[in-house]
Image: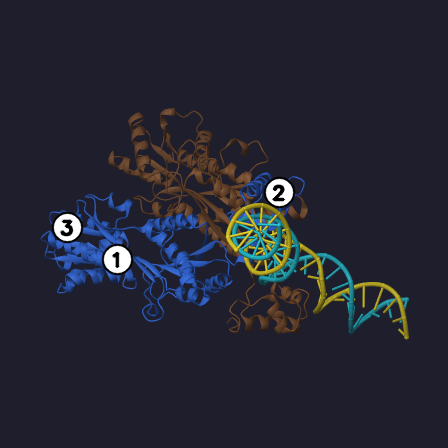
Chain colours: A blue, B brown, C cyan, D yellow
DNA sequence: CCACCCACTGAGAGCGCTCTCACCACCCGG
DNA sequence: CCGGGTGGTGAGAGCGCTCTCAGTGGGTGG
């Protein structure tokens, strides 16, 4: 492919020479070819092909100030975000959309806070056109690190730290946690259930608190005894369920804040001799394929379009920034995607 | 931080002016400061600090021809490599070592063969200093795509396609699958087991065939009825185990080619009324934390240092290449890491 | 038939950095 | 006291690309 006479890769110059045109013309053809007469363009394209020319990214970046790369920041504090199927789907959406935007995904794996410095330097160094991060716990310092780096950023999941509410607003993509929770609880009520419990997630995650808010929207008067907290894991769901059954053995429905906890709750219900859905109706959240169909009975749950959220994050980051340049209009700061109740056998 | 008078980030030039030295001197200080007198260097460092100077990566890459970035190619054919804990550990090792080398991780997610073109272009475009890939199925075209791109590459897992055996040899990192398998089987034999079955993995993965070879090394005369193939999943392990029990109800030990299948096999053994380890001793492979300790009894298995393998891949790629430049000596083409039998209750 | 316009092409100036030299003190031995 | 190091510094030439701006040719209206 590449010119065997020289060891290094062919440059624009080489292509220009071979095609008998100037560098500028080659550049135009390579970048879409607008404003170049057809026969000339064809000649250039042939030279490109013959030489196996590939544009030098660094040189291009140097002048355009665009990198064609976006950082995805994965903070892994205590639990495994990486192998989480939720995360995988989101990454897939991000990756697909990035490819569509001709951009690359630079994975920044942060293991502890000592690395914040490194991240800040990297982001500030102009290596990437923007950053994507996932809002983890509310007290995480990462968001402010990203913010100070002065690079455009979009979060996955509504950030819980105070600045988001006050300041100019940090762009994020999230599903309608509250609305989805409302729908789930309303559905349970429509089934005639009257003692509906909620297994909530960790209190320092907005996904948890928003879902809890949705539960309370529908059942403002609910007995606090019908509320227990888990940690979004199967075991945590089982523990919370045990707690609830101890307090309120008469409960007839459970809305769990995610599918993993619903699965744990299901096991505990079974162990205590409750039939699902006859005695206790159960609804989860997420519609995580690996969980939802593995349970017996299959889990009724609230679906969110995780991959779509990943794609939206990229669009918000890349197109949002572009939109701002062109017309000066403020791009949307946040996107909330719809949820959908998926009825299976558990409720 | 950055100079508020100009919108853009400060350049080397600006730092030089502020410190009252030349660009060259600033460059020297920024890159380690060798050969610059202490007081001058300090003056430069202060200017850097005051201006909040961060080197422009593109400009540096343009002249040094080093990107400080490595591509990690994730091909996701049918199954979920991404959420596989194995992969997560390997990526963690890669990420850590890359950080130590001051390099970034560019994630290239390949969904289907139509994207090979895109990958080839990217790799050939000199965006990265090298590529890391995982040898998937033997018939995958990806390796040859990577090879043709002419970029240094290291594989995780011994590649199975023929060129690896003939040609100049493709660098790879793998654990001693065959030796580990031998150790597992020998251990079962040392326990007095005489009818040792093997649940092998997919035949088009070298990890499977190498482990099978290890089994045969120790038991060359074994009844073919004691061999069944699974697909590295829990369900596949259960199916294979059922098959084995049908054929040889008298078997007294099983060596499964990975922990997931061992876990499936355990379930099937239990379902058929076999006690583990009393009636049937069971050994897995991988030492996958999430599986190995969740089983009852805990699984005896062959441990491989997955994270370490990830780190080695990076070293082989980056240091290997450097070594070649300096002394002309061929760097090691492959690294095989040791395995270790971890005894728990299942055997 | 000429001036003018438009569409296209080329020349050239950088983008911010590294790196090779040339240069300049200054110190040493002779 | 002078020639030849020697360690430190600066000047300048690119790296490969984009992009502005000037120039060139052919077509068209007056």
Instruction: Please tell me the numbered disc located at residue A281.
Output: 3
Q: Tag 2 or tag 1, which sits nearer the N-term?
A: 2
- Which secondary structure lies at badge 1? loop
Q: Position of residue B100 (x, y in %)?
A: 53, 56
Q: Left or right: A221 with respect to B174?
A: left
Q: Residue B106: x, y in percent?
A: 48, 51
Q: Secondary structure at mark 3?
A: strand
- The label number, if any, that marks residue A218 in the structure image: none
Q: How many badges with numbers are in the image? A: 3
Which is nearer the N-term, disc 3 or disc 2? Answer: 2
Binning the other alpha carbons within 10 Å of mark 2 as few (below 14), some (14 to 19) or many (20 upward) gives many
Q: Are marks 3 and 1 in contact (CB under 8 Å)?
A: no
Q: Which of B55/A28 is in front?
A: A28
Labels 3 and 1: the sequence-earlier one: 1
Q: Is residue A124 left or right of residue B36?
A: left
Whether residue B183 sits left or right of residue A251 in the image: it is right
């Amino acid at each position: 492919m590449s010119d065997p006479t020289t060891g290094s890769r062919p440059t624009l110059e080489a292509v220009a020479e071979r095609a008998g045109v100037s560098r500028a013309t080659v550049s135009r053809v390579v970048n879409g070819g607008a404003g170049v007469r057809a026969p000339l363009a064809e000649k250039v394209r042939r030279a490109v092909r013959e030489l196996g020319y590939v544009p030098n990214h660094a040189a291009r970046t140097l002048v355009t100030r665009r990198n064609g790369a976006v950082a995805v920041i994965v903070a892994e504090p205590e639990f495994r975000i990486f192998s989480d199927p939720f995360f995988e789907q989101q990454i897939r959406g991000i990756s697909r959309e990035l490819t569509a935007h001709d951009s690359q995904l630079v994975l920044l794996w942060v293991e502890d806070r000592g690395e914040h410095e490194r991240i800040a330097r990297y982001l500030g160094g102009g290596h990437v056109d923007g950053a994507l991060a996932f809002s983890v716990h509310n007290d995480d310092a990462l968001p402010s690190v990203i913010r100070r780096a002065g690079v455009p950023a979009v979060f996955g999941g509504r950030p819980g730290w105070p600045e988001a509410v006050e300041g100019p607003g940090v762009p994020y993509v999230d599903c309608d946690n509250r609305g989805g929770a409302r729908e789930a609880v309303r559905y349970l009520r429509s089934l005639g259930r009257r003692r509906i419990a909620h297994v909530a997630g960790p209190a320092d995650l907005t996904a948890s608190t928003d879902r809890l808010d949705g539960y309370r929207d529908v059942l403002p008067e609910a007995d606090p005894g019908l509320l227990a907290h888990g940690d979004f894991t199967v075991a945590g769901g089982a523990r919370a369920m045990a707690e609830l059954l101890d307090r309120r053995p008469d409960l007839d429905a459970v809305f769990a804040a995610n599918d993993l906890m619903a699965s744990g709750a299901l096991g505990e219900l079974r162990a205590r001799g409750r039939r699902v859905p006859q005695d206790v109706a159960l609804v989860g959240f997420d519609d995580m394929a690996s969980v939802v169909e593995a349970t017996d009975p299959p889990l009724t749950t609230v679906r969110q379009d995780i991959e779509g959220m990943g794609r939206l994050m990229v669009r918000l980051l890349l197109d949002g920034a572009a939109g701002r340049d062109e017309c000066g209009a403020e791009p949307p700061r946040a996107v909330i995607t719809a949820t959908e109740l998926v009825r299976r056998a558990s409720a």
